[in-house]
Amino acid sequence: MKLVSEIQTLFPQLRVTENALLRDITTFRVGGPCPLLIEGAAAAQLPAIIQRLNKTGQPFLVIGQGANLVVSDKGIDQAVIRFCSETPTITADGKRVTVSGDTLLDDLAVFTIENESGDLSYCSGIPGTVGGGIAGNAGAFGRQMGDHLISAEILGLDGRTRTAAKADLEFAYRHSKLKETGEIVLSATFELPIEKKEIMQAERDRIMQFRKDHHPDWHKEPCAGSVFRNIEPTSAVERRKAAGFFLQEAGAHLFRVGGARLYEKHANIIVADPGCTAQDVWELSEKMARAVKNKFDITLVREVRFLGEF
């Protein structure tokens, strides 16, 4: 493919793979190929890469750690740029922290605690990158990424960059405008509440233990966390209700389709057993949604993103 040689000539340090299996770079470990996988790009290189892809007419998408994705067994037609790094890029100035979009959320939590830069302990153990977390307004324990964001450097699908204020991103529960536009977070600046290091560390320890007790380790039991969003309140006096409760009451915790099953400790998490396919995951999610609809007349909204044909 001519495009491969062009990209490798422009950025020889990148890893460029044709017909790459996306199951190898997602936490669910299912799914088919993409025509081109580009890995190892720094934020400063992304605009030129995207402009090159646009020039050749190659459709593309940018992903982070692949922690919230299920890719069709048939694969997808888009080239995939994996914007994810195990080397954190973070700076702190008082209560303000600026971080690259490819930094892992857990690495950001560790940095802010160790440097007493502010409290992001709720991000502890959340798979995924800062960029993906902002796009999906990730969160836990009543807090979410949009709460303390000041601004973000955004890369458009045309390869142009802009600075967006918090209000521009239109945050809502597990949602931001970026989910609609497909734009990429190159970096973000947060202003965080300051807390004592020992208090933040104790909270991180508590959260990590909670996750160990209640959630699967995706390295051993492939998954993508909660399949469905929690239920939004119908009035200001109500609290958000856990989708897992309704799934449990509807009997979904006993469901299995092929190699896909519900985690024994959490009725809203699908785990992929050996031999599982992306289609198994999709069909199980459909079965779960139908069960809740039939019993409670509630339409669940997916939190996991399904890509391709199902």
Image: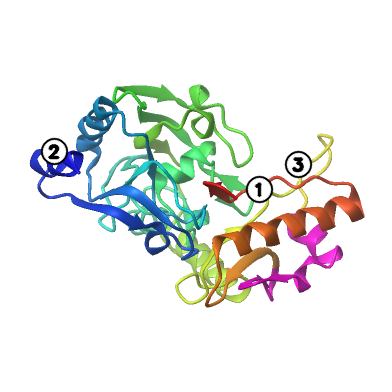
Please say if the residues under marks 3 and 1 sit with CB atoms less than 8 Å apart.
no
Which mark is drawn over residue 6?
2
In three-dimensional space, the C-alpha distance between marks 1 and 2, rounded to whole angstroms, equals: 38 Å
What residue is rendered at 45% in x and 32% in y?
182
Disc 1 residue crowd, few under 14, some 14–19, many 20+, Cα 10 Å: some
| Residue 47: in magenta span | no
Q: Earlier in the sequence, mark 3 or mark 1?
A: 3
State how many labels appear: 3
Q: Secondary structure at mark 1?
A: loop
Q: State the extent of the magenta-drawn residues as a range.
A: 242-266
What residue is rendered at 17% in x and 49% in y?
14
Q: Secondary structure at mark 2?
A: helix
Q: For this view, does 266 lie left or right of residue 94?
A: right
Please name whichever residue, 87 or 71, is drawn nearer the observer in this view of the structure: 71
The x and y percentages for residue 214 are 63, 72
The x and y percentages for residue 160 are 29, 22
Q: Earlier in the sequence, mark 3 or mark 2?
A: 2
Which mark is drawn over residue 302?
1
Q: Secondary structure at mark 3?
A: loop
Residue position for label 3 = 232
Picture layout, residue 290 above or below residue 233: below
- Circle 2: residue type: Glu
Please name whichever residue, 163 or 297, is drawn nearer the observer in this view of the structure: 297
Residue 65 seen by the camera: no
The x and y percentages for residue 220 are 48, 77
| Residue 259: in magenta span | yes
What residue is rendered at 77% in x and 73% in y?
254
